[in-house]
Amino acid sequence: MRVLVTGAAGFLGSHLSRYMLGKGHSVIGIDNFITGNIENINDLFKNPKFEFTKYDVTNYLHVPGKLDAVMHFASPASPIDYLKFPIPTLKVGALGTHKALGLAKEKKAIFMIASTSEVYGDPLINPQVESYWGNVNPIGPRGVYDEAKRFAEAMTMAYHRYHGMQVRMLRIFNTYGPNMRLNDGRAVPNFMTQALKNKPITVYGDGSQTRSLCYVSDLVDGIYRLLISRENNPVNIGNPHEVSLLELAETIKKLTGSKSKIVFRALPEDDPKVRRPDITRAKKILKWQPKVQLEEGLKKTISYFKARV
């Protein structure tokens, strides 16, 4: 296949590009570096099947030649980023999705939208199933990301229904691994950076709120399985193993051998109390489930962070 990956220099986009190249496919990457990093993809430039252009996907999108898939992964994805870049976050979810869909339609290519568990908001059910409509505050500080992704899903489904396009709708749950930014603001990079510097590890709220953490290699395997499936409806991809943030902080402290103290801070507005995917559909349709245990994945991620802290 010849595929376009938007957000190719980001955390997930870089792993996805590397995986696709490893499968023998050709990858055209684009990124405007608002949160992406060229270091994430430096090794890919040696591969003759990799092309890259610095570009903003919210502008008119033209790619010469055939394309088999357009994989739209461009977006700020952590609260620290979408609070800093609220309007670009909305634009990449709305205008960027529209431009990427138009390109996929023109090329008769599969369109994949990287959506998120954030479409469920602060959920009133746990675990979250794809049929759940969510509990989202559209005007809260996180609304710029939540609603951008909800709109992106709505537009993707409109193109599927109206134009008969093949679409893939991927709802990504918390993912971690190498290529995350040290100042990303999410729990794993925050805890690791603080622990490795022996600084206080900051846990928001009382630490009882939960996350379900999927190692990036498992996630990318699920993404690929969804791409080559025939499934046009949303599919949760994530790890159903639930862990409290306090437990996560304590585990990272133990694995790093840190002398840090764990301190507590006020819970941010609209921060979800639970986050856990129901992956019944992924198991049935994609024959997929995560394999990497939490401590194993955390050790690999700590090695990456140690080299950079």
Image: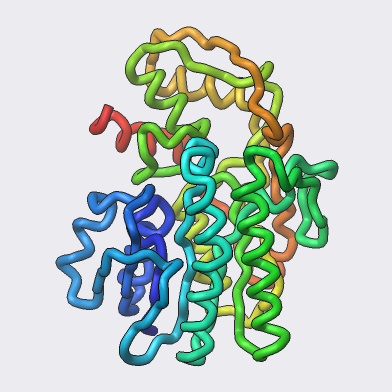
Q: Quick one: which residue is furthest to the left in this view? A: 46
- The chosen color scheme is rainbow
Name the residue: 70% across, 69% down: 154
Which of the 4 image quadrants contains residue 276? top right
Name the residue: 18% across, 76% down: 48
Q: Is residue 293 visible?
A: no
Question: From the viewer's perspective, is 125 left or right of 103?
Answer: right
The answer to which of 34 and 177 lies nearer the viewer is 34
| Residue 108 versus residue 72 in the image, above or below | below
Q: Is residue 123 visible?
A: yes
Question: From the viewer's perspective, is 69 left or right of 246?
Answer: left
- Residue 249 spot, x, y in % from top left: 53, 22
Q: Classify the position of the C terminus by image quarter.
A: top left
The answer to which of 162 and 294 lies nearer the viewer is 162
Name the residue: 64% across, 74% down: 156
| Residue 165 versus residue 39 in the image, above or below | below
Question: From the viewer's perspective, is 66 left or right of 308?
Answer: right
| Residue 196 versus residue 174 in the image, above or below | above
Q: State how many labels appear.
A: 0
Name the residue: 51% across, 48% down: 77
| Residue 73 versus residue 196 in the image, above or below | below
- Residue 182 spot, x, y in % from top left: 36, 33
Question: From the viewer's perspective, is 154 left or right of 69?
Answer: right
Q: Classify the position of the N terminus by image quarter.
A: bottom left
Which of the 4 image quadrants contains residue 200? top left
- Residue 71 spot, x, y in % from top left: 47, 71
- Residue 75 spot, x, y in % from top left: 48, 55
